[in-house]
Amino acid sequence: MKKTKLSILLRIILILSFSCAVVFLAPGENSQPIVKNTLAADALPMPALEETAGSKQPAQEEQAIVSNPRDVQEPAVVEKTIIEPKPAGMSIQIPKISLNAPVVGVGLEANGELHVPGNLVQAGWYKNSPEPGQTGTSVITGHFDYGPNFAPGVFYKLHTLSVGDEIFVRRNDGSTAVFAVKNMEQYPQNNFPTSKVYSSSKLPELRLITCAGFYSKITGRYTEDLVVYAVLDRVVSYS
């Protein structure tokens, strides 16, 4: 009877010991907190992530490229050619006869006659006369025609001018002296009124001279000269 009671008592002690062991071992198996404070966790700042090569997104790469001034392609510079109204030298324009020709300086021949440029498309300004537009009488000459084939010269149509027609002479300084035809005269070459044509004037005037009349195969010259008398109307300057 005593053994039976002792056996029962031992079993009770063993059961109680095992229960205590379970109670004290349970916290050890769950050492981490079971319930997380989500609010506290969300409130914690996230640590900054270091960017590594190739970690950028495509959109970020595109933005970085655009924001770099060195990578932005600048528009091509287009050079504009500005046409200045100022000519390189003297020239003459007569709209009535569609004339636009360069003017070169000329002097006198050995026989005292005014030299005429051999180039058919050039006119010659007598260098001993005032520059066109200055006070006095300026003289410009040019061929009517030239050579055995009678090729038209720079003043081929000069005889078709009328009183009031305008003559434009662009000068070396870039300004333009504008003359108006006053009258036209035709003189025999063997009786040319040199003093009248070349005499100085108190006003800025212009004389245009070319051949006229009939061509003589015997002398190789025309029988007359045409002189256009013009007076200064205005001077146009370019800035």
Image (cartoon, rainbow, N blue to C red):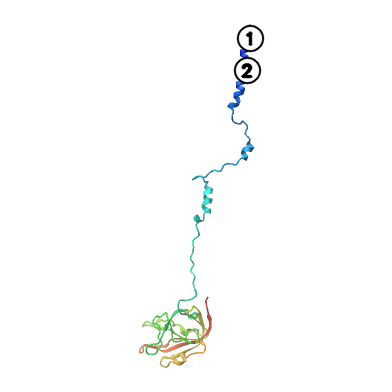
Q: Residue furthest left?
A: 218
Q: CA distance from mark 1 to mark 2?
A: 17 Å
Q: Nearer the viewer, residue 67 or 113?
A: 67
The residue under the point 62% across, 10% down is: 6
Residue 4 place in picture, x, y as percent:
62, 8
Q: Residue furthest top?
A: 1
Neighbourhood count class around disc 1 (C-alpha, 10 Å): few under 14, some 14–19, many 20 upward: few
Residue 227 place in picture, x, y as percent:
46, 88
Q: Which mark is residue 233?
A: none
Q: Nearer the viewer, residue 222 or 113?
A: 113
**Mark 2 lies on residue:** 16
In the picture, which quadrant includes the N terminus?
A: top right
Q: How many marks?
A: 2
Neighbourhood count class around disc 2 (C-alpha, 10 Å): few under 14, some 14–19, many 20 upward: few
Under circle 1, the secondary element is helix
* On screen, residue 1 above or below 78: above
* The image quarter in which residue 42 lies: top right
Residue 82 place in picture, x, y as percent:
49, 70
- The amino acid beneath tag 2 is Leu
Marks 1 and 2, the one that precedes in the sequence: 1
The residue under the point 52% across, 47% down is: 58
* On screen, residue 68 above or below 107: above
Residue 158 place in picture, x, y as percent:
46, 84
Q: Nearer the viewer, residue 134 or 120?
A: 134
**Mark 1 lies on residue:** 5
Under circle 2, the secondary element is helix
- The amino acid beneath tag 1 is Lys
